[in-house]
Image (cartoon, rainbow, N blue to C red):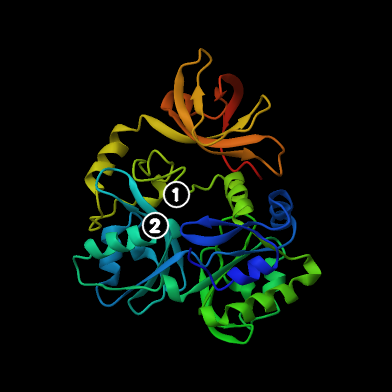
Amino acid sequence: MKTTPFTEKHIALGAKMHEFAGYNMPIEYSGILDEHLTVCHAVGVFDVSHMGEFWVKGPHALEFIQQVTSNNAAVLVPGKVQYTCFPNETGGIVDDLLVYDYGQDKYMLVVNAANIEKDWNWCVSHNQVGAELENSSDHIGQLAIQGPKALATLQKLTPVNLSEIPYYAFQVGEFAGIPEVIISNTGYTGAGGFELYFYPQDALKIWDAIFEAGAEFGIKPVGLGARDTLRLEMGFCLYGNDIDDTTSPLEAGLGWIIKFVEGKNFTNRAALEKQKAEGVTRKLVGFEMIDRGIPRHGYSLTDAEGKVIGHVTSGTMSPVRKIGIGMGYVAVDFSKPGTEIYLDNRGRRLKAQVVKPPFRK
């Protein structure tokens, strides 16, 4: 298995380790519930160094990004970040990603860890305009510091005024005495906070400085288990569960990241325009349990008569709400909030209700 700059730190801290996307990653430390609530109420630190980073440079950088991603990168200005996806040629999604605009014809694409090789091959094979591409995934470390006390923790360590970095924006500056750290107001928890990008050789110095600065706030390391429950409470899609090569971004409720602007001829544009005009036959919805039960990936969703209308893509017991919550694709007729549906839990039909995420307000 691959390691991150923090792998030995996780093991020394007693983390429960497991393979994820080819990396030896921490799943939990003090327990998923405790870590989840720490992020909601204080501050937690996630090692996300397994994520992939590609540089796109040169005079054709924007043209390339416009061709391979669905959102309109032309509206970006230096210091801004955009959520988008790579559409494939059959109506599905190669991956969802972030685009960082550095200015001067330079962009950073941040992709999912499990898709690094797939995404890199996709970008290389679809680079018809001669953009300069560089896969720096093995040369960048990343931490996500999330929670209401994240700003107060990190502000001790940088002269950059963090309160002046808007959501989905970033600055490059000194952090914990390290120059040229990317400080990004982004995250995957809904609890607020920042993501830091840095060279691996600086990783442990940055980790130690963050934990010293956050000690007064009860800072804790957080594993991938709580990262998943946090994103699910917010209704954020997880690639491989809620979206994949077979799911349309329109079905997934991601129509807002598809921009059919003039001159932007991205992959499969015509088919997605046709689908938008004609409508979809299924939609990704959020639902919460009325009966006691925990939705799990792959469980069937049915109507009152037991007819299958869809399936669960993500589910858990909400650490904040203390009820079962989930996301899944259902036939359009059952997608309206307030609609009663049923979860088939190994032959037991349990009542649920379609709701509009987030589940945690």
Instruction: Name which residue lies at 46% across and 57% down.
Output: 21
Instruction: Name which residue lies at 61% across and 71% down.
Output: 8
Number of numbered discs visible in the structure rendering: 2
- Residue 230: x and y, percent? 62, 50
**Left or right of residue 96: residue 342:** right
Marks 1/2 in contact by CB < 8 Å: the verdict is yes
Q: Earlier in the sequence, mark 1 or mark 2?
A: 2
- Residue 295: x and y, percent? 58, 33
Q: From this viewpoint, is residue 307 visible?
A: yes
- Residue 186: x and y, percent? 55, 63
Q: Against 274, is 88 above or below?
A: below
Residue 239: image tag: 1
**Left or right of residue 136: residue 205:** right
Mark 2 secondary-structure assignment: helix
| Near-viewer residue (263 or 202) | 202
- Residue 232: x and y, percent? 58, 45
Residue at which label 2 appears: 115
Cα gap from disc 1 to disc 2, whole angstroms: 9 Å
Q: Against 213, is 111 above or below?
A: above
Q: Against 291, is 203 above or below?
A: below
| Near-viewer residue (236 or 346) | 346
Q: Which residue is situated farthest in the left direction here?
A: 128
Q: Residues within 10 Å of mark 2 (few under 14, many from 20)?
A: some
Q: Quadrant of the C terminus?
A: top right
Instruction: Name which residue lies at 42% across and 26% down.
Output: 331
Residue 266 sits in quarter:
bottom left
| Near-viewer residue (170 or 352) | 352
Given the image, on which type of amino acid does mark 1 rest?
Tyr
